[in-house]
Image (tube, rainbow, N blue to C red):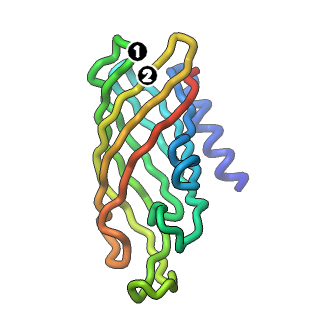
Amino acid sequence: MKKIILIFGLLISSLGFSQQEVKLDIADALIIKSIEVSYENYITTDNSFGISALFNLAKQDANFRYNENTMITPYFRHYFTSDAQWNFFGEGFLGINSGKIESVEDSGNYDLKYTDAALGVAIGTKYSSEGGLGIDIYGGLGRNLFGTDSPILVPRVGVNVGWRF
């Protein structure tokens, strides 16, 4: 744990002179019972890269939940409009995800664990205020590449509220 905090601290301090944003996905927290936090760093006014971490808090047998229990998602965004308060963007992402699935359909026994990586794209829009408040809404889809036990498609949807500094 100390190593992870140290690496995260070094990453943030090395990017200290550019605009950065920390966000929380409120739609996931309220609707799906999961926590997704994101960090985004702006390379230029038109491009940024970031990483988000999703932790699913819903029980495995819940009717409406993500298949993934955890997902780490590095992403790259290109903003098509950067001079307005509402900016449209396209995103490419790699979702490293893990979870459990049923070995026998409709058995209720979630005993097959998987870890996979999904490559995907998303589109969205972002509101940025002068004071630093940021709200972005996006949706996209990725495809798992390696596992045979993992779900084929991985969704990437959210409504993030964050602060730019």
Calculate the distance from the C-alpha at mark 1 to the C-alpha at mark 2.
5 Å
Q: Residue at x 44, y 82 (%)?
A: 102
The reply to whether callout 1 and callout 2 are in contact (CB within 8 Å) is yes
Which residue has dot 1 on it?
85
Quarter of the image containing the N terminus?
Answer: bottom right
Number of dots carrying numbers = 2
**Residue flagged by tag 2: what amino acid is it?**
Tyr
Label drawn at residue 127: 2
Count neighbours of disc 1 (C-alpha within 10 A) and say few if under 14, some if 14 to 19, many if 20 or more. few
User: Residue 38 in the image: x percent, y percent?
Assistant: 53, 40
Residue at position x 37%, y 38% in the image: 138
Q: Secondary structure at mark 1?
A: loop
Q: Which mark is residue 116?
A: none
Residue 147 image point, x, y percent: 34, 73
Residue 126, above or below 157: above
Who's the residue at 53% across and 50% down the image?
Answer: 31
Q: Amino acid at mark 1?
A: Gln
Residue 58 in picture, x, y percent from top left: 58, 63
Front position in the image: 123 or 7: 123
